[in-house]
């Protein structure tokens, strides 16, 4: 086993590799860019090396800098994670030329699967079923059109060097073929520098099922299948293992085909063989076809780990260090069912656009496995993939695991940036998905329902108001000035609409709120605030936003009235108390010249100190209170001389 490895990646996969390495007693070296100076993976590693600017091309894609960092820190091997340099055969060769081990397949194996047309030809030789289509080198437009006619419409045009849906077009009939071909080529040329395409039969009711394989360069095993059919724009959203509706004979056929594919290229390490499956009439041994092979660890590998009990990163380290495969095929078994949901910072109503921002709060329930490369306080930057976490659950049955996923997502708390959490929650509770009716078109068919905005209620507003006013956990002697009930107002804003609330606190166990002319009485029972039989949900208060952790996050804008200056008070001459409290300090004196924004006094209210500021330049005419005074809301504290008297 290695003594020290370098992880040539960032985010959740770097953290994931570090966790296994730490368990095995293997030292770790992280690399980081300017944007990742304080990143989670940097803090987790035993050592970290800065390798360049924030853009991937200036840091994580600089193979020479990564290799130099490994050599300088005494690392014996490099783990590529996924993305970046993980499937770059030139990088693999450079790593090995430097005397280091590459924790992954050989450059030859990566090249063999790098181009879709060559890979398909190789699979035909290995006896792996491929989708009927044209994969030839002749790229003449008329020839491609004739091949499409032979295959039969609908057909799929795909860039031979493609991935992620780029350079891919669905063509329904011959009339649309020429335009689709030109469009696919243009996109492929821009994305990959290669305009060549292949043409394949489009499978109706397609399902995307992939098989996890693992090899040692000589032989390979499979660790069963994952279903990744729940996709949007060819991007995976929720993955599961095993595949719904899978039968023993289909599993055996797919697993054997995947192993043949791996052994045909002398594969070493973790890889995934992806199949397109006809789901129109159940799964059949003759109804699946090879799509491509990913020569790396996959993002969705945790669901395979959950149902097999295998740590795939541990296997990677053992095989790369020279050990044989840790298990034979007959040693591997399935147990239960697992799901993984990809939580992203993205604006779903705006078309799933990637989002940025500071994660003010991030918390996951203890019942889920959350693989994440960020923490509360971290920034989602524009430089990298905006994934926040992978939420993974495992249960004895598919129904049980899906219920755990739905509950886990409902209890996940994110504040500070928009996310796809509500979208994931809707998918987890989708009736068709629950019934196992999965195919790659499910999301698009039901997109409107899946992206419907959550229902906002008066109870959400009250939860936000309680958090803003800090009256969630009141001590018995809190805030009841002059033996009178505490009354407070707060204004929230949601979707451009101002929402006014008022609360009367009659004791530490009772509050009455007015929201939209509706009066709601709250009682403290069992450590929770209750409105009738409903529990007031928790909330997190940020500098200008408050997020209620219900319905996957309801967010309001707010302005702290205690942080305002006194410009709201008539002519600006009077600084008054915005709420009942105790004057903790007076920093102004009669006759003192002050500037706008100067602190004149400090009021302690609701367990917090708040600075009261001058609304304008002027001269203090009168100080009406002293430190220690208890005051009511609206009480005059300091008066400035009228502006005409100071001229």
Image (cartoon, helix red, strand yellow):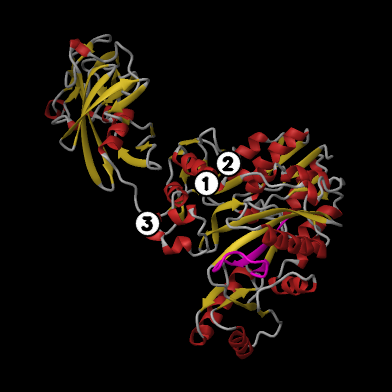
**554 and 149: which is toward the camera:** 149
Q: Please name which of the two marks, 1 or 3, marks the residue nearer to the observer.
A: 1
Cα distance, mark 1 to mark 2? 8 Å
483 to the left or right of 77: left
- Which residues lie in the magenta part? 271-291
53 to the left or right of 438: right
31 to the left or right of 456: right
Q: Looking at the image, is 213 positioned above or below residue 506?
A: below
**144 and 579: which is toward the camera:** 144
Q: Position of residue 75 (x, y in %)?
A: 80, 41
Counting labels gives 3
Q: Which residue is mark 3?
A: 449
Q: Secondary structure at mark 1?
A: helix
Q: For residue 411, say whether it is visible.
A: yes
Q: Secondary structure at mark 3?
A: helix
Q: Position of residue 308 (x, y in %)?
A: 69, 45
**Is 286 included in the stretch rendered in magenta?**
yes
């Amino acid at each position: 086993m290695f003594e020290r490895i370098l992880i040539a990646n960032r985010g959740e996969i770097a953290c994931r590799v570090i966790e296994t390495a730490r368990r095995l007693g293997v030292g770790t070296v992280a690399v980081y860019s300017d944007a990742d100076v304080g990143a989670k993976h940097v803090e987790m590693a035993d050592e970290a090396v800065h390798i360049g600017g924030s853009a991937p091309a200036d840091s994580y894609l600089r193979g020479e800098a990564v290799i130099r960092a490994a050599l300088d820190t005494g690392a014996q091997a490099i783990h590529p994670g996924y993305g970046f340099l993980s499937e770059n055969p030139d990088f693999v060769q450079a790593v090995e030329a430097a005397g280091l081990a590459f924790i992954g397949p050989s450059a030859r194996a990566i090249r063999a699967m790098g181009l879709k047309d060559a890979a398909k030809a190789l699979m035909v030789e290995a006896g792996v079923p491929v989708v009927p289509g044209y994969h030839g080198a002749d790229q003449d437009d008329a020839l491609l059109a004739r091949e499409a006619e032979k295959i039969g419409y609908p057909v799929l045009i795909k860039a031979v060097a493609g991935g992620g849906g780029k350079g891919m077009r669905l063509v329904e009939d011959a009339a649309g073929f020429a335009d689709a071909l030109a469009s696919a080529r243009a996109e492929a040329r821009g994305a990959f520098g290669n305009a060549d395409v292949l043409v394949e039969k489009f499978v109706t009711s397609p399902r995307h099922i992939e098989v996890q394989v693992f090899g040692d360069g000589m032989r390979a095993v499979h660790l069963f299948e994952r279903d990744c059919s729940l996709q949007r724009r060819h991007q995976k959203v929720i993955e599961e293992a095993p595949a719904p509706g899978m039968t023993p004979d289909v599993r055996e056929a797919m697993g054997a085909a995947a192993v043949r594919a791996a052994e045909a290229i002398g594969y070493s390490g973790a890889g995934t063989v992806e199949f397109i499956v006809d789901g129109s009439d159940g799964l059949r041994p003759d109804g699946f076809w090879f799509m491509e092979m990913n020569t790396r660890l996959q993002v969705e590998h945790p669901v395979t780990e959950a149902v097999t009990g295998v740590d795939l990163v541990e296997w990677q380290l053992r095989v790369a260090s020279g050990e044989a495969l840790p298990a034979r095929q007959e040693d591997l078994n399935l147990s239960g069912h697992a799901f993984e949901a990809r939580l992203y910072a993205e604006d779903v109503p705006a078309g799933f656009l990637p989002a940025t921002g500071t994660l003010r709060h991030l918390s996951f329930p203890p019942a889920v496995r959350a693989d994440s490369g960020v923490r509360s306080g971290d920034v989602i930057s524009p430089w990298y993939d905006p994934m926040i976490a992978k939420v993974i659950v495992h249960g004895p049955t598919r129904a049980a695991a899906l219920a755990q996923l739905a509950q886990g997502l409902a209890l996940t708390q994110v504040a500070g940036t928009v996310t796809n959490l509500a979208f994931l929650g809707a998918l987890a509770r989708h009736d068709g998905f629950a019934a196992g009716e999965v195919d790659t078109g499910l999301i698009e068919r039901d997109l409107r329902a899946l992206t419907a905005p959550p229902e906002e209620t008066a109870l959400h507003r009250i939860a936000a108001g309680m958090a803003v006013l800090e009256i969630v956990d009141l001590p018995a002697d809190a805030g009841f000035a002059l033996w009178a009930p505490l009354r407070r107002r707060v204004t929230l804003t949601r979707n451009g609409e101002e929402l006014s609330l008022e609360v009367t606190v009659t004791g530490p166990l009772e509050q009455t709120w007015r929201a939209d002319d509706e009066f709601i009485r709250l009682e403290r029972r069992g450590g929770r605030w209750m409105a009738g039989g409903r529990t007031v949900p928790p909330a997190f208060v940020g500098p200008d936003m408050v997020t209620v952790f219900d319905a996957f996050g309801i967010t309001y804008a707010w302005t702290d009235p205690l942080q305002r200056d006194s410009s709201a008070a008539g002519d600006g001459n009077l600084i008054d108390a915005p709420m009942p409290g105790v004057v903790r300090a007076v920093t102004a004196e009669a006759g003192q010249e002050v500037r706008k924004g100067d602190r004149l006094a400090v009021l302690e209210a609701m367990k917090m100190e708040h600075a009261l500021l001058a609304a304008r330049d002027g001269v203090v005419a009168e100080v009406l209170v002293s430190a220690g005074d208890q005051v009511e809301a609206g009480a005059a504290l300091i008066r400035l001389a009228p502006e005409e008297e100071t001229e």
